[in-house]
Image (tube, helix red, strand yellow):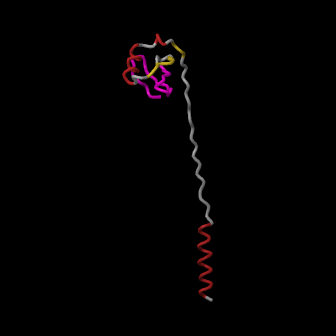
């Protein structure tokens, strides 16, 4: 009889450890998107330093459109092969990571 009661106590004790609830952890991710004002410029108005940097870095790239903001940063819409993308550069032809 002692063994039966001891076994029941062990089983009930082990079941109570599984009944605990795990703490709920919630993590919130906030994303802030800052949109800068770019105005379209003619391709002839793009500085030669940017055109030269584009030819050096991406020889097969075709410049489709160009945009400029108030701080003279240029956004370039380019096509390389069958892929289209955007590049950013300052007026001196230095690439900007955005």
Q: Is residue 16 above or below residue 7?
A: above
User: In the image, is residue 45 part of the stretch drawn in magenta?
Assistant: no
Give percent across and percent down for residue 35. Answer: 56, 25
Nearest to the observer: residue 44 or residue 91: 44
Give percent across and percent down for residue 22. Answer: 59, 59
Instruction: State the residue at coordinates (46%, 23%).
Output: 88
In the displayed orientation, state which residue is furthest to the top. 44
Q: Quadrant of the N terminus?
A: bottom right
Give percent across and percent down for residue 85. Answer: 50, 26
In the displayed orientation, state which residue is furthest to the front. 81
Q: Is residue 80 above or below residue 1?
A: above
User: In the image, is residue 91 part of the stretch drawn in magenta?
Assistant: yes
Residue bounds of the magenta highlight: 74-98
Instruction: State the residue at coordinates (58%, 43%).
Output: 28
Q: Is residue 1 above or below residue 14?
A: below
Assign the magenta stretch its main secondary structure: strand
Give percent across and percent down for residue 10. Answer: 59, 78
| Left or right: where 1 falls relative to 91 | right
Q: How many marks?
A: 0
Instruction: State the residue at coordinates (60%, 74%).
Output: 13
Nearest to the observer: residue 42 or residue 6: 42
In the displayed orientation, state which residue is furthest to the bottom. 1
């Amino acid at each position: 009889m002692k063994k039966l009661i001891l076994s029941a106590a062990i089983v009930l004790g082990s079941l109570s450890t599984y009944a605990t609830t795990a703490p709920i952890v919630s993590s919130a991710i906030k994303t802030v998107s800052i949109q800068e004002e770019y105005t379209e410029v003619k391709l002839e108005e793009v500085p030669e330093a940017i055109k030269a940097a584009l030819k050096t870095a991406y020889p097969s790239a075709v410049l489709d459109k160009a945009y400029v903001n108030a701080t003279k940063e240029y956004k370039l819409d380019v096509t390389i092969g069958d892929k289209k993308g955007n590049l950013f550069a300052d007026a001196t032809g230095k690439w900007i990571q955005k």
